[in-house]
Image (spheres, helix red, strand yellow):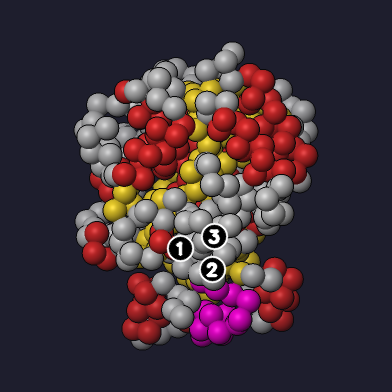
Amino acid sequence: MQKIDKKLLNFVILSKKECIFDCVVYYSNKSKIQDFFYKNNIEVVKDLDFLDAFIVRFNSTNILKVASLNYVYFISSVSNVFALMDVSKNILGINNLGYTGKGVSIAYIDTGINQHLDFCLKRNRIIKFCDFVNGVKTPYDDNGHGTFVSGVASGAGTISNGKYGGIAPGSNIISLKALNEKGEANAVTILESMDWIYSNKTKYNIDIVCMSFGSEPLGSFDPIMKGAEKLWQSGIVVVCAAGNSGPQRETIKSPGISKRIITVGGFDDKRELDGTFSFDKFEVADFSSRGPAFGRIKPDLIAPSVNITSCNSHGEYKQMSGTSVATPMVAGLVAIIKEKYPNSTPDQIKRYLLHNAKSIRNINYAEGYGVVNITHP
């Protein structure tokens, strides 16, 4: 199995001298990889706990050593490949549609949100913030994940002249902080957030819930799965991440195991530095969790998930990879559909998305129905 992304591997192989560069290392055993880094004096730049990953500063020799470890399942470049949100919009078929998700409200259960200019300039689209972790009244994000995820779907791209605008830049934002500064949460705060959404969906016109998190499934009575299904039954479209535990089968996280809600995996669009891409080169990301779940096809769809640029909680932008990135892309697509068809039900929207998806490898346990494109919603 290829454990280093191809462009990065080629760079390492072709380098004529020792180079230093940053990479994302996805792991299956955090304590073991931390111990290896410590013993080999490898610098950890950032702990991406919510992705089961670290940003690590490597030299050409160390990266090959780390790739050989059985508890490391993928290494991705972060500094030499650039992914733009406008390219993702082309892939998903929404450029020049004329819809922005205006009037549609997306609730994000995540680490919170910072008041980035892409959300607040001209009109503050953060219409509600609730903190189920620390009880703070004003918007904040002590991790950064929630701000990034919100930007992928709802960012206006204001300070990048639209270049890094989200899929539905006119949508309203409801930020529910249920994950702590480490990107972690227990079921209690997640369920509290779901209960708040259920109770306030009419007051805040909540149409969509974006859940870029996952937990180990607990069977058919999993409480987080059941909570997500309750929201779906109430008329809210629930979009969640498949998880970052691929490429093994049956690794979909909760609530993505639910047969009702929309579960999103990730793919690498293999775009060139100039932003061009070819559908034939698309590949399901190695880290993207695979199905089936309860014997059913999961994930439902896949979306761009490798080296995507969105809002940085400290201002301007940053890059990230993972199914956490793919999920708000689909949430943004749902917002566009809801803007045009405000009376559409969750089941109708899901059927529409699946009908307009195209498989890239005909492996349904890895990609579900494939990549969605809504050129004509």
- Kindly identify the amino acid type of the residue bearing the numbered disc 1: Tyr
Residue 51 appears at what percent x and percent y?
Answer: 59, 57
Query: Badge 3, how many Cα within 10 Å: few under 14, some, many 20+?
Result: few
Q: Is residue 187 left or right of residue 334?
A: right
- Kindly identify the amino acid type of the residue bearing the numbered disc 2: Arg
Among numbered discs 1 and 3, the one appearing first in the sequence: 3
Q: Is residue 76 magenta?
A: no
Residue at 38 percent of width and 84 percent of height:
13
Residue at 48 percent of width and 43 percent of height:
262
Query: Badge 1, how many Cα within 10 Å: few under 14, some, many 20+?
Result: many
The foreground one among 366 and 177 is: 366
| Figure quadrant of residue 229 | top right
Query: Badge 2, how many Cα within 10 Å: few under 14, some, many 20+?
Result: some
Q: Which residue is mark 3?
A: 295
Q: Which residue is mark 1?
A: 365
Asked if marks 1 and 3 touch (Cβ < 8 Å), the reply is: no
Q: From where the camera sits, is residue 49 visible?
A: yes
Q: Tell me the quarter of the image containing the C terminus.
A: top left
Element type at mark 3: loop
The foreground one among 241 and 10 is: 241
Q: Which residue is mark 2?
A: 249
Query: Spatial distance from mark 2 to mark 1, Cα to Cα?
Result: 7 Å
Please name which of the two marks, 2 or 3, marks the residue nearer to the observer.
3
Among numbered discs 2 and 1, the one appearing first in the sequence: 2
| Magenta-colored span | 61-74
The foreground one among 265 and 257 is: 257
Asked if marks 2 and 1 touch (Cβ < 8 Å), the reply is: yes
Element type at mark 2: loop
Residue 31 appears at what percent x and percent y?
Answer: 74, 71
